[in-house]
Image: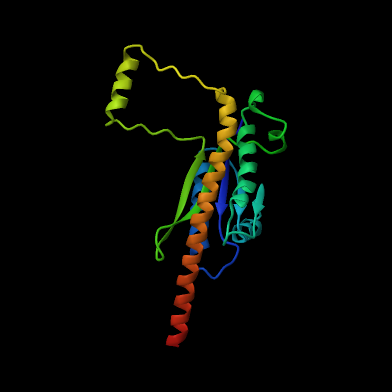
Amino acid sequence: MLFRSAMLVVTSDRGMCGGYNANLIRAAEELHALLRDEGKSVALYLIGRKAVNYYTFRGRPIEQSWTGFTEQPSYRDATAAGDVLVRAFLAGTEGNDSARSEESEEVAGVDELHIVYTEFQSMLTQTPQVRRIAPLEVEYVDDDEQQSSERNSSADGLVPLYEFEPDADELLGHLLPKYINTRIYAALLEAAASEQAARRQAMKAATDNATDL
């Protein structure tokens, strides 16, 4: 079965903000090309009218879109997109019926979630970011003494034993939506700050040019 990735692209609803949207869409297109080169199909989820207009004009299929709040996003806006993505991720494409619910069957399943947004670094610098938010990527740090001792214990045949209450599946079902929604909300806030900074720069440049003329 074809591996399927979901790509959430966060642009602005309005223009007049310089290269803000162009730089973001360029990063999204690079990710799209990379995923396609890896043999994955891509499902587009869009936030912001600029992204919707861009992909609609090019005839790209859009799974779902949300508009009208990019300048002042709320947590409710994040959950509107997050709930859809969580259902798609839990549905998956691997045919694991035990992990599916009646609600998740209503959406096309995906195997991984990516988000493309603009990170606010300063009033002069805003950088497009590409992040995979699910499944999680685990990083190991070799210079930690505790981890070194844990590896030595594992080498001796001693494996840590963990107990979950409630069970791991139920715990994941509660934590995953909160995690995804929080990551999306944080990205929306970064994007909103970046949009305002980019618009301020563009308007200042336009005013300066008009004054010079």
Name the spot of residue 6 as percent of width and height, x first: 58, 42
Q: Nearer the viewer, residue 153 or 34?
A: 153
Q: Residue at x 50, y 47 (%)?
A: 31
The residue most toward the top is 157
198 in relation to 185, above or below: below
In the image: residue 110, left or right of residue 33: right
The total number of labels drawn is 0
Q: Residue at x 48, y 35 (%)?
A: 136
In the image: residue 131, left or right of residue 108: left
Name the spot of residue 122 as percent of width and height, x first: 39, 62
Split into 4 quadrants, where in the image is the C terminus? bottom left
Q: Nearer the viewer, residue 207 or 192?
A: 192
In the image: residue 57, left or right of residue 156: right
Q: Residue at x 64, y 48 (%)?
A: 80
Name the spot of residue 212 as percent of width and height, x first: 42, 86
79 in relation to 25, above or below: above
Q: Is residue 26 visible?
A: no
Q: Is residue 80 visible?
A: yes
